Amino acid sequence: MDNFKVMVVDDELDFLETIIKRLKARKIEVTGAESGQKALELLAEQDYDVMVLDVKMPGMDGIETLREVKKRKPLTEVIMLTGHASVESGIQGMQLGAFDYVMKPVALDELLEKMRQAYERKLIQEGKV
Amino acid sequence: MEEKYYRKLWWDIILTTLGFSVIPLFVLGLVIYLQYSVSYSAKITESLKTLAENRVGAIDLFFDERISQLTTLANTNPLEKLRNEDYLNRVFNIIQTRSKSFIDLGVIDEEGNHLAYVGPYYNILKGVNYKNEEWFNAVMASGVYISDVFMGFRKIPHFIIAVLVREKTNIWILRATINSDIIENIVGAAQIGKRGDAFIINRNNVLQTTPRYSGALLSTPNTPNFSSATGLNVEEIDYQGETSLYSTNVIKAKKWVLVIREDPKEQLTPLLRARYITLLICGAGVLLIIVGAVFTTRAMMKELVRMERKKAVSEDLAMQSSKMAALGKMAAGIAHEINNPLAVIGEKAGWLKDLLHEEDLAQSPNFQEFADAVSKIEVHINRAKKVTHRLLGFARRMEPVQEKVDINAVLDDTMPVTGTSIFKRILRKGFPKPPVTPPNCSRFFSIFSTTPSTPLAKMGRLRSRPPILPRSIAWPWKSAITAPAFPRRCWIRFSTPSLPPRKWAKAPGWDYPSPTALLTSWGEE
């Protein structure tokens, strides 16, 4: 069933810790990264199917990280996590190849559903390739 | 302060305009008048000079001819012949047939005895001895002599020409009396106009002809003394309170002085008329310029004031707009910052919920309480989330783009934030979907339903049509708001900075009208 590998990137450590615990409780293989830089390092070590990426982070922000991810591992599906209600950063992210965007705070089930959809798309994309 | 500034500006403009228009006008008028005056005066002087020259020429010619006549007569006839009065009479008659210049002729010997005489005064003059007369001595000395006008033995004003003849043995004189009418006529021709005068004076300033106004024959003329004049001259002289133009010239044959006097007023009438016309034109020009300047300046000042007002209004609106922008930014900042902790709380609550299901806490007597508390936390996080998301929506940048928007949805979104339901009644029917920007709508409704202000009731009515809509598009609000709920016609304008409420932006004390107050004043709850 949900045997896909997920990476959550957020500078808010409390949020990161808790969401990892909850996803793990749902038997999802999840890794956390507290910055864009860290996420890229982890991505270099192994592939991830879905990436949940906070837009607003100190240092390398979500959009920049997304750009790098798509450059290095184009098949990784990315869900943007935004504190802005403005559609702009979400739309910008989608133009850069993100799968979708969700607004904080988000219910975990909702996020999980998005992840599953993203993973499905990834499978389809891989099949094509 | 402002009034004073405008007044000063008004004067500045008026004075500058007048300065730059009136000064050239006056300079032009003055220069033209002076040029005209100079050339006209020169012309008058010239004509006076010509007249004087011309008259003197005529007199000199007359004298020359008379002298030639007498000289010829005296030198072609011996004394023996001429002292015969019959012969002299014959000669005189021959002369008289062609010219009446001579009144009489006489032959006088060197002793002054009248040898022969023909003429009207035979009885008086025949026996006269001229030895002691002034003219006799003069002619004996100079050979040819023209006398001044004098009374003589006949007691009538006259003058004579005498020619001295030297023969081998004797010396004698041929003397003629000249008809002074001829001189009078020549001089009289120079009496120009109504006040002009002309006369001849001798070197003693005694009148030799009869002037029109300037005195009697053989008296001193009531003019300046020109007896010592040396040649042709014209000048304007004030004499006894009267200004006259005097032209003088010297008669060569006798050293008399011809004086022509003219009234400058008469001569200079065209010049005076030119002066009046110039003054009149200048005056009319100045008047016209003043009127023009005043009108132009008034129009200019009006426009200036209008522009200033417009500027003030737009500055006000810009300030309002920046206030709104700041407010929006602040709202966005707050919402964003709240979202992060909210997300953490949400996750933590979720985690608690997860744990509650896993552990054997189910047996705990307080399990239900825990579960209730967690789900309440989630409910209220959702509430808070809605609020922050609305705040973010409110703060979104306003862009003047047109897109389809469901005003009902915007209303539903906005009303819970502002907590006003006044529109629900008005807008019961629901709106069609006009193309307006959602943030504008949202902002409008929120402002419209929350701004606390009172002066609106005084304004009477709102006017409006959202300017981003072309006039051809029927604005649905109009129908909505003039619906039966409203007794009077009421238009509403978007109160966003990009759509300035022109008429009611300047009322003191409030930024935007309160629809609540408005509706209350109309009897609406």
Image (tube, coloured by chain):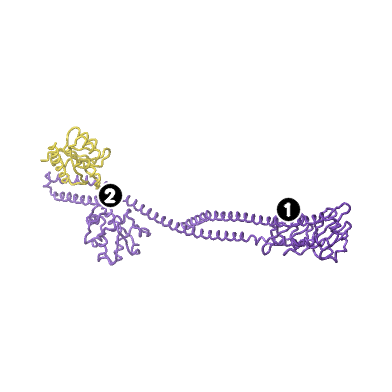
Write down which chain is painted yellow.
Answer: A
Q: Position of residue B195 (x, y in %)?
A: 68, 64
In this view, the residue in front, A42 or B271, is B271
Q: Secondary structure at mark 2?
A: loop
Locate the C terminus of chain B by quadrant: bottom left
In this view, the residue in front, B131 or B211, is B131
Residue type at tag 1: Gly
Please give the chain letter of the residue carrying mark 2: B
Residue B240 quadrant: bottom right
Residue on which disc 1 sits: B231
Residue type at tag 2: Arg
* First reached walking from the N terminus: tag 2 or tag 1: 1
In this view, the residue in front, B43 or B395, is B43
- Same-subunit check for callouts 2 and 1: yes
- Residue situated furthest top in the rendering: A45
Distance, label 2 to label 1, CA atoms, is: 107 Å
